[in-house]
Amino acid sequence: MTNSWADLAGRLGVDLLLDVDTAPGVRGRRTALAAALRSAITDGRLTPGTALPPYRSLAADLQMARGTVAGVYQELIAEGWLVARVGSATRVADLAHPVSTPRARPEPSPAPSHDFCLGQPQPALFPRTDWIRSTRRVVGTAANSAFGIGDPQGHPATRRSLAAYLGRVRGVRTDEHHIVLTTGVSQSLELLSRSVFGDAVAVESHGLPFHREVIERSGTRVRPIPIDRDGLDVGRLAASSLTGVVLTPSHQYPTGHALAPRRRATLVDWARERGGVIVEDDYDGELRYDRDPIGAVQGLAPDDVIYLGSASKALSPAVRIGWMVVPDRLLADVLHAKGSREATASVLDQMVFADLIDSGAYDRHVRRSRSYYRARRDALTETMRNRGVECSGVSAGLHAVLTVSRAMEPQILSVAADRGFVVAGLDGFRHPDAEPSPSGGIVVGFSTPPKHRFQADVAALADLVATALANDSTTSTVAAKSMHLSVTDCP
């Protein structure tokens, strides 16, 4: 039977099918082959420099005479579509005047002069060698079943390893049966919105806008609860009719204050008395610098807390692994919302992550990262202090909030944008229905600048903020007493 399709993927390095029998408007297979090749070059399936197979091989695939295919090659070489050199494959020419004009690409945005982007660790810290070693070990030893359809709750061995790790490092009380693996906190919140939250859930008055958007997009309204230096105002929560709350108790984002011990106890009592649920986003629990990390609230009330975490801050946002620790009474509903088949997560990455934990490589990486980020934070705070800006707040995380007056915040943001700084304003994290903070803030990610630029970028930032404060007639007389740096962490 005549094979009218030539599958060139193995030879060209791209997936390409040539139909030489049905090329429109042509007669004869030689003419059809030439037209099909021109078409593939014109529409970009064959890009400049792509090597075509030897004419003998293509002739065999198409069941055409060798001379016919060789003649087509020569014809397209003469027309300028192809180029041929002695000792080299016939390749697609780099046409000076393409037959079709590609769509114009948007002009790239200019690179910032001082990049203090939020929400990501330093990419250079990713443990490439350990990841490769664990990948080889996992791929070489895993059972064949591991490469089939994944368990929607997550790979069992990963859940076992993670349960032990969270118990040891964060004081979480759980086992593999109560862990649900996801692609990150966003997916976790989306699942909870469809299974646990109901009509409305409380959130902190200042937090990640995209977290609120994920919850609302799934049909749950969010209502802001005020925060202060002791964290969430649990009294205001108790005065509402809500039965669920999402918060960051160990290190409130973005203000950086931990939930006070007495409020932790009150929060747990509220959940037990009301039959409510606490959703604890422990986004940076491992990255505490001045002392041991504050333990998770989940350890106080495992039956009333859903604990959320991910590998995005300690490891990399490119590794899409998150987790929920779910109380027994809510587990069936969450799993039903997730579905009977894993549709999003990479089970292979989950297995590699488990191997990192079991081998001790993940602990070593976290310790190295903690030392690196602490040195950066210390350099940042020292530079600010030398410019008269005092430092306060929890010593942790990947970003800092420079506290300024509410009036100064938009002014500094405007100057910063003009000078190529990537920073954010504290008010940008406020829920639209929440009251503004008593003071403003400039939020900067000290993990982002590359090593060779870090000191210069921090010095430039200090100059910008200190100059703005000195020129502010409403704050300059009290700046030495009241201005400080409140260190917080990335989401």
Image (spheres, rainbow, N blue to C red):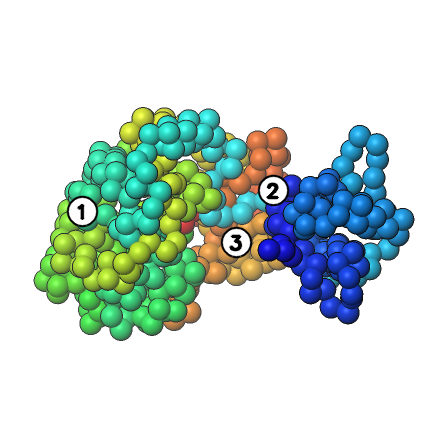
Determine the residue positioned at 14% across, 54% down: 328
Determine the residue positioned at 41% across, 65% down: 213
- Name, please, the residue furthest toward the left: 273
**Residue 198 rendering spot, x and y as whole percentages:** 24, 70
Mark nearest the camera among 3 and 1 is 1
**Residue 127 rendering spot, x and y as whole percentages:** 45, 30
Image position of 83 (left or right of 361): right
- Name, please, the residue furthest toward the front: 1
Identify the element where label 1 is drawn: helix
- What type is the residue that disc 1 sits on? His
Q: Nearer the viewer, residue 435 or 218?
A: 218
Identify the element where label 2 is drawn: helix
Badge 3: how crowded within 10 Å, few (<14), some, or many (20+)? many
Q: Which residue is mark 1?
A: 177
**Could you tell me if the residues under marks 3 and 1 are in contact, i.e. CB atoms within 8 Å?**
no
Image position of 94 (left or right of 261): right
Determine the residue positioned at 78% across, 56% down: 30
Above or below — where is 93 with respect to 135? below
Residue 312 visible, this orientation: yes
- The tag earlier along the polypeptide, 2 or 1, is 2
Mark nearest the camera among 2 and 1 is 2
Q: Which residue is mark 3?
A: 424
Q: Nearer the viewer, residue 134 or 444?
A: 134
Numbered tag placed on residue 10 in the rendering: 2
| Mark 3 vs mark 1, CA separation in Å | 40 Å
Badge 1: how crowded within 10 Å, few (<14), some, or many (20+)? some
